[in-house]
Amino acid sequence: MIYAETPLTGAMRKAVQDAWNVPADGPAERLFGGEESAAYRIGALVVRVGPAWRSDAETEWCHAVAAHAASRMPEAVAPLRARDGATVVRGDGRPLSLWRHVEGEWPDTEEPTTRTQAAALLARLHRALADHAPPPRPTRSFAEIGLDGAFPEDVPELADPDLDRWLAAFHARTPARQVVHGDYYEGNTLARGGRLVALLDWDEAFVAAPEFEVASAALEWTDEHARAPELRRRFVADYHAAGGTAGPMDEETVAQLIRHRLRRETAYFNLARARGVEHDEDDLDYHRRRVREFFALKP
């Protein structure tokens, strides 16, 4: 997996110190993870360094989603506000945000109770965000492209008119929309003592039918298992049992929404390569497996 190698520079530290009025000159520990952003722990705080191309407006929009969720559920981690009320400042041309550090580690998805917790946490998150009515997202989310059935021109190698027609019909018959996290997988959560304690990284939040996120999460939390289809069904059932806002989802709905997610992943892979990212063999193998899954799940 390729992770961002962006350093925490002196100019960034000064920008954080000036904006939040906190000491930012102590030892900085690079936290694990982050394909686009890099996170550094300084004492009880975490400085997050985003990619230069992400706008402040988009970042603030996503941070507002995190703040709304955090007001309703303790696991949601929201950024701290600077002295002027903003949650993002620029340092060395990059968006910087400040967060409280949460002790924990990536959860063990081999543990059945972890997957059950993840489904229930997603259900609570969707309930928490159901009444959040933000203005339009300043920049279109990557996952949103093609979700309405429009042909996604950035991934022609996975052209599938049948999928496009299905997505268009789903979009028309499923009018309920709400804010969703957008990237709900184990790498954006933390566990402690076998319990999920934190939900992080809100950069991909957008407005969609919640069914899309349920299907995507069912994929992400069961992907490495030989019994993945059975476990995906269980994940969706656990989500509904926990009172999530998504409507009923049959096998075709889950499969086609997963296929949309996989197609967007391929588009992102292509974009990252165009930006100069050099993928290692593990990344390439993962990409190939996900493409095979796209075709294997076709109804």
Image (tube, rainbow, N blue to C red):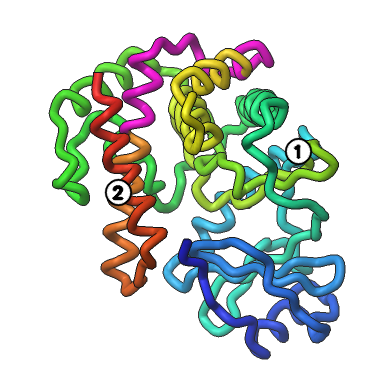
- Residue at 50%, 16% (x, y): give it: 233
Q: Is residue 245 magenta?
A: yes
Dot 1 amino acid type: Leu
Work out whether mark 2 precedes mark 1 in sequence or the reverse, and give the earlier one: 1
Camera-nearest label, 2 or 1: 2
The stretch of residues the image draws in magenta is: 239-259
- Residue at 41%, 10% (x, y): give it: 250
Q: Position of residue 127 (x, y in %)?
A: 66, 23
Q: Does residue 128 appear in this view?
A: no
- On the rendered structure, is 48 left or right of 53? right
Circle on res. 265: none
> Label 2 to label 1, Cα distance in Å?
30 Å
Nearer to me, 14 or 198: 198
Q: Does residue 172 appear in this view?
A: yes
Judged from the image, the secondary structure of the residue bearing numbered disc 1 is strand
Circle on res. 196: 1
Q: Position of residue 169 (x, y in %)?
A: 25, 17
Mark 2, residue position: 288
Image position of 2 with respect to 211: above or below: below
Circle count: 2
Dot 2 amino acid type: Arg
Q: Position of residue 177 (x, y in %)?
A: 47, 25
- Residue at 61%, 52% (x, y): give it: 201
- On the rendered structure, is 129 left or right of 183? right
Judged from the image, the secondary structure of the residue bearing numbered disc 2 is helix
Q: Quadrant of residue 185?
A: top right
